[in-house]
Amino acid sequence: MTFWALIILTALLITLFLGYSMLRGQKTREPAAAYDLRVYREQLASVDRDLARGVIAQADAERVRTEISRRILAADAQMQKQTTQSGAPRWATGVAIVVVAAVLVGGGAWMYRQTGAAGLPDQPLAQRIERAEVLRAERPSQSEFEADLPSAPRPQLDESYATLLQQLRDTVAERPDDLQGHVLLAQHESNAGNFSAAYKAQERVIELSGSTASADAYSHLAEMMILAANGYVSPEAEEALRQALSRDPRHGPAQYYLGQMMAQLGRPDIAYRIWVDTLRDSPAGAPWADAIRAQLDDLAFRAGVFNPPDIPSASTPSGPSQDDIDAAAELSVEERQEMIRGMIDQLSDRLATEGGAPEEWARLINALGVVGDRDRAVAIYEESLSVFADNEGALQALSAAAQRAGILQ
């Protein structure tokens, strides 16, 4: 109600200001004859002054007075004939003011009902954060959410594949401790669209793997749970994502789904930060990066971000990685040097024109050290120190790269 009162009051104040301007302009408007009268009176006074100074003769003064007096009488007669002021009549001005008020107040209310959220109560930031925490704590479990989902038709499988899948199920049932069998079962159940069966098999994979279970294993478990729940990130899926990120803090798929969960819980601000960091760490062509880019603009709008930071696009080359440099060892010396220098120049040009993450600067320094270009590595290192002067973590990563490149002892 407070919002509506403020909007209506603002519209009325604007209407009053415009109406006052129109009425004031009408009051100050005068006919042309009134201006002529002032000029003629000034001319009469000027004739008297000229006669007193002896500039003109008495006869000439009388003749000029007679002519000016005639003009004064004509102008006065013209004013007497004008019964209304020039311009729009008062009733037209009043109608215009009413129309302006109707457009501002009524039109504004109509537009808000069409594009706004009429009837929605005020939502202070602290209240929204508190509601998001309650929603996170009270959201349904994986089994509860799946139980409420409408039954969906199973995909039709090729008869031979369906037979092989059933044989795999029977074999795994007979060998409950067969790790490889459960890995295959989880994979093929997922391929067949049986995501509930797939994540149950994946849970057994993690159980059998024990402490050696990888970040990928937990990420696959979370993904199968999310697919089984039609995109909903349950508390169990969240726990799997946390386990994956505890093993690999930069695991792309786990970060993607964690951001998706935050968006579902009403925290698009956190989701946006997670996805932006994920994009910066993602290799070129990563499928989760493409999924993030497709949704990032909408998420930025929901998060209230109107000046998004620079984010590498899908076509942005990532520059030479350590794997690229290692693979070059199989080439001849000339071919290896040419390949590495081409990638180095490509990355160097992009960092000089567009900037980049600290990891990319560190990669460039390391690559220059590999090819023996110490002077250029030193120059890039010194430049990076000025770029990331206020980022302690980035400075540590750059110093480590400089040590690997042999330019910092």
Image (cartoon, rainbow, N blue to C red):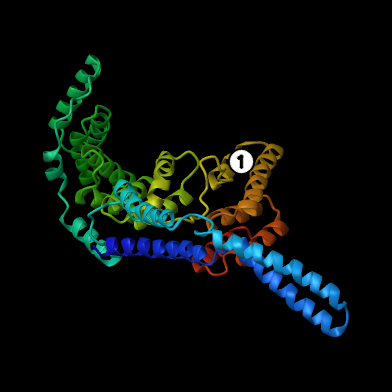
Amino acid on which the number 1 mark rests in the picture = Ala
Q: Could one spot residue 279 in this view of the protein? A: yes
The percent position of residue 43, horizontal first and vertical second, equals 75, 73
The residue depicted at 25 percent of the width and 62 percent of the height is: 122
Q: Residue furthest bottom?
A: 52
Q: Residue furthest top?
A: 159
The answer to whether residue 335 is left or right of residue 232 is: right
Quadrant showing the N terminus: bottom left
**348 or 352: which is nearer to us?**
352
In this rendered view, identify the residue nearer to me: 110 or 315.
110
* 99 in relation to 17, above or below: above
Towards the viewer: 197 or 123: 123
Residue in the picture at 66% in, 49% down:
349
**In the image: residue 97, left or right of residue 399:** left
Query: What residue sits 70% from the left and 65% below the top?
Result: 70
Read off the residue under disc 1: 329
Q: Secondary structure at mark 1?
A: helix
Q: Quadrant of residue 137?
A: bottom left
Find residue 211 and report its horizontal and vertical position in percent: 26, 52
Quarter of the C terminus within the rendering: bottom right
x, y percent for residue 166: 17, 23
Q: Residues within 10 Å of mark 1 (few under 14, many from 20)?
A: few
User: Above or below — where is 245 with respect to 21?
Assistant: above
Left/right of residue 234 with respect to residue 370 in the rendered view = left
